[in-house]
Image (spheres, grey):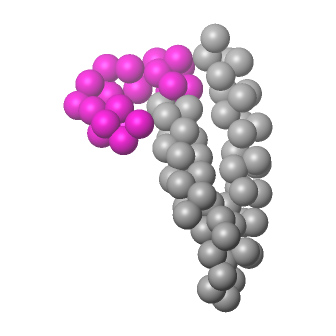
Amino acid sequence: MLLILLSKHKRIWAGTRDGKIFYWMCRFCLILCLLETWGFFLDGKLFPGARQIALVCNTIIMLLAVPLSYLWICYV
C-alpha cells in the first residue's frame, strides 16, 4: 500500500474520480493494516494501558471498515 501511495504514477490516476476513490481506498487499507498489526502485538500484553490501546485499535478498525466498504462499492 505504501508503494502505491508513494508511486510517481500517482499523478496519472489521481485526477480521475476512480483514481481518487482508489487512492482513498489505499489510504484506508494502509491505516487498517497498521492498526491490525498494533492490535495483534498488544494482544495479551500486560503493561498498563495495553488493553485500552488494543480496544481503541480494534474500534477504529471496525469504524474504518464502513467507509472502505462504501468506497469499494463506488469504485466497482
- Residue under the point 61% across and 68% down: 42
- Residue under the point 68% across and 18% down: 74
User: Which sits in the foreground, 11 or 35?
Assistant: 35
Look at the image and give the residue range highlighted in magenta. 1-22
Above or below 25: residue 27: below
Residue 9 highlighted magenta (yes or no): yes
Is residue 18 something that shows in the picture? yes
Please identify the residue farthest to the bottom as the structure is shown: 48
- Quadrant of residue 39 within the rendered picture: bottom right
Locate the C terminus and report the quarter of the image it occupies: top right
Locate the N terminus and report the quarter of the image it occupies: top left
- Residue under the point 72% across and 57% down: 58
Is residue 53 something that shows in the picture? no
The location of residue 26, given as percent across then percent down, is 49, 34
The location of residue 2, given as percent across then percent down, is 36, 41
- 58 with respect to 9 (left or right): right
- 46 with respect to 33 (left or right): right
How many marks do you count on the picture?
0
- Residue under the point 75% across and 66% down: 55
The location of residue 21, given as percent across then percent down, is 56, 26
Above or below 39: residue 28: above
**Magenta part mainly helix, strand or loop?**
helix
Above or below 27: residue 71: above
- Quadrant of residue 51 within the rendered picture: bottom right
Above or below 54: residue 50: below
The location of residue 33, given as percent across then percent down, is 53, 46
- 29 with respect to 51 (left or right): left
Please identify the residue farthest to the top as the structure is shown: 76
